[in-house]
Amino acid sequence: MNTAGHSEATARRGLELTPFRGLRYDPDRVGSLASVTSPPYDVVVRPDGVHHLQSADPYNIVRLILPQAGTPTARTEQAADTLRRWLDEGILTADPEPGLYVYEQRDESGMLQRGVIGALRVSEPAEGVVLPHEDVMPPVVADRAALMRATRANLEPLLLTYRGDGTAAAEVVERTAEKPPLLDTTTEDGFHHRLWSVTDPADLARIQSDLAHQQALIADGHHRWATYLRLRAEHPSPSPWDHGLVLLVDTARYPLRVRAIHRLLHGLPVADALAAVEGLFRVRRLDTPLAEALEALADASCAGNAFLLAGDGAFHLLDRPDPDLLARTIPADRPAAWRSLDATVLHATLLDHVWHIPEDSPAHIAYIHDTAATVAKAERDGGTAVLMHPVREEVVRDLARQGVTMPRKSTSFGPKPASGLVLRALEI
């Protein structure tokens, strides 16, 4: 009996990264490469951020990733029309041959990150190749899927991490970074970006061979990965939808920063939030600057769950939750590491049972990465900012390997790749 096919089918597959012809801005047709870039779609603060980026350059990528129109259908049609027009006008052009792309970010503090951008085979969570660690919101997946269907493009790469071991892929990345780049620009946030293409067959094979034995953690882009899965299921294989655009970073060599994503609770004044937690958490008022309040939060987090509320001109540190409250409100059938997460306590205990706020309603809650912006918006709008302390990457990875997903928007890995440096058009 021939068992070769069976063993090949059941052998564990690793990361399969495929070269593609990147779609990039023609630097002679835009004001500057920096002016057409954007943070990822979910980091742009609406509406101020969108308007600022739109006015920065008429060809800013935000017009594709966050089109502004009256209805969802009009938004996706507008993005598709804009992409077609930019292609026809030569604003965006495809590189002449397929390749993988080495991408570098460096900030003013000297932080350096390098990784590889390519088209990754989309795999189900059960395969254990790409590990999600957060739940997703179905309306956001539906929105991203409609946008990708309309544009037939991957407009921005996801951020995935893996743990390399000083292999040949790293050697190719470092050697490539010594050559003149395809693009070199500094964005207004102070990050310096460089991009190179890798087209040599031997170098491509080295990278692909090394990654074939790796698994990756989704650091940023859970909704876009869920979108890739949905779109792949909609199209008979083989098709271009079998792959999705990603940036893979070896965090053994280039550790990422892990930051918290904060919550802004609309329509819940700080006084009401504090009244509801009286007797359930220890509450201490801090009349200190933001930096000192965050230090107090970090100290409190060492001993257990802790949160910082803001929006009334002061900071209020919540810690030492009532054990009976946690026992009543947190599901007992999950791993201890999940049950003790700040995000778990926030969503299962505070949002659901104490404040009665639906976590998936934009009318009630917003998720914001920038700490100062969250506080400022709460003070301006009369809501409550809930500031979180970041979880460690090792905790995230261990949970993901157990198949346990964290509450949505639990972490913010960075630095995130800038959108607009390289796109993938499925027809090219």
Image: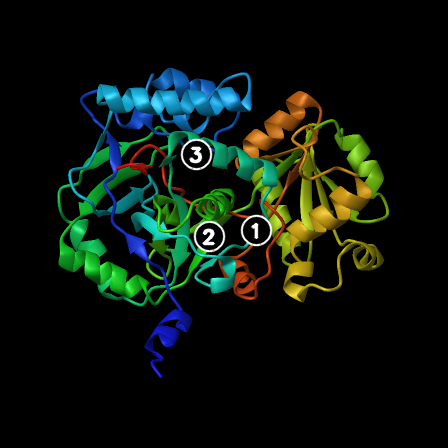
Q: In this view, does 230 lie to the left or right of 204?
A: right
Coloring scheme used: rainbow
Front position in the image: 108 or 93: 93
Instruction: Locate the C terminus and report the quarter of the image it occupies.
Output: top left
Q: In this view, does 17 lie to the left or right of 297?
A: left
State yes or no: discs 1 and 2 in contact (Cβ < 8 Å).
Answer: yes
10 Å neighbourhood of mark 2: few (<14), some, or many (≥20)?
many
Give the residue number, with chain letter if any, for mark 1: 134
Decide which of tag 2 and tag 3 comes sooner along the chain.
Answer: 3
Q: Which residue is drawn at 51% across and 23% down?
A: 73
State yes or no: discs 3 and 1 in contact (Cβ < 8 Å).
Answer: no
Give the residue number, with chain letter if any, for mark 3: 149
Query: Nearer the viewer's eye, disc 3 or disc 1?
Result: 3
Q: Which amino acid does label 2 sit on?
A: Ile
Decide which of tag 3 and tag 1 comes sooner along the chain.
Answer: 1
Q: What residue type is labelled 1?
A: Glu
Q: What element carries label 3?
A: helix
Q: What element carries label 2?
A: strand
Residue 421 in picture, x, y percent from top left: 29, 35
Residue furthest to the front: 1
Q: Residue at x 42, y 72 (%)?
A: 10
Q: Which amino acid does label 3 sit on?
A: Arg
